[in-house]
Each structure stands twice: as structure tokens, then as C-alpha cells.
Image (tube, helix red, strand yellow):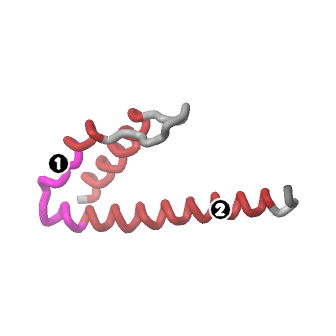
């Protein structure tokens, strides 16, 4: 294994984190924009959470943890709208 591997792994993790943050920002602001015009969006999104599941096929799968994150996201969206 190369001595640069840990650096490359850290860089990949940082890149993934930055992508996630960028997507979350764009998604959140898009939803806020739409919800301002269509307040029923909040309820529709909350109803959809029962169908949200973690696609992992190993020991990291946790459907409820995923739904908890989504609920927090939606709670923030309601507070901002």
C-alpha cells in the first residue's frame, strides 16, 4: 500500500462531505422556495417518510436512523418556511 493512501482516503471523504453539503444546501433552498408557494408540501413530505428506507445491505442499515435525519430536515424546512 502506498504511503499516500491515507491522504487519498481523507481527500475522498472530504470531497464526499463537500458534495453532500452542497446538495443539501441546494435541495433545502429549493424545497423552501417551493414550500413557500405550496405549503401542503410539508405534509406530503412527512407522509412519504414511511416509505423511506436505507439501501445498505450490510450491518450499517438503519431505516429509522435515516427517517430521523429526514424528520429533522423537514422540521428545519417548516421552521424556515
User: Disc 2 designates what residue?
Assistant: 12
Examine the rendered structure and indicate whether residue 52 appears above or below residue 5: above
- Residue 57 in the image: x percent, y percent? 49, 37
Magenta-colored stretch includes residue 15: no
Q: Main secondary structure of the magenta part?
A: helix
- Residue 2 in the image: x percent, y percent? 86, 60
User: Label for residue 44?
Assistant: 1
User: Label for residue 33?
Assistant: none
Marks 1 and 2 sit apart, C-alpha to C-alpha, by: 35 Å
Question: Which of the 4 quarters of the picture holds residue 10?
Answer: bottom right
Horizontal side of 10 relative to 63 (left or right) equals: right
What kind of element bears circle 1?
helix
Examine the rendered structure and indicate whether residue 81 appears above or below residue 53: below
Residue found 63% across the figure and 58% down from its top: 13
What kind of element bears circle 2?
helix
Q: Are marks 1 and 2 in contact (CB under 8 Å)?
A: no
- Residue 17 in the image: x percent, y percent? 56, 59
Residue found 36% across the figure and 39% down from its top: 53
Residue found 37% across the figure and 68% down from its top: 26
Question: Which of the 4 quarters of the picture holds residue 60?
Answer: top right
Dot 2, how many residues are within 10 Å of its Cα: few (below 14), some (14-19), or many (20+)? Answer: few
Residues drawn in magenta: 33-46
Magenta-colored stretch includes residue 43: yes
- Residue 49 in the image: x percent, y percent? 27, 41
Amino acid at each position: 500500500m502506498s504511503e499516500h493512501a491515507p491522504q487519498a482516503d481523507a481527500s475522498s471523504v472530504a470531497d464526499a462531505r463537500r458534495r453532500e453539503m452542497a446538495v443539501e444546501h441546494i435541495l433545502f433552498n429549493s424545497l423552501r422556495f417551493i414550500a413557500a408557494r405550496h405549503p401542503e408540501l410539508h405534509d406530503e413530505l412527512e407522509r412519504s417518510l414511511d416509505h423511506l428506507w436505507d439501501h445498505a445491505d450490510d450491518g450499517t442499515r438503519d431505516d429509522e436512523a435515516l427517517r430521523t435525519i429526514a424528520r429533522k430536515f423537514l422540521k428545519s424546512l417548516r421552521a424556515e418556511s
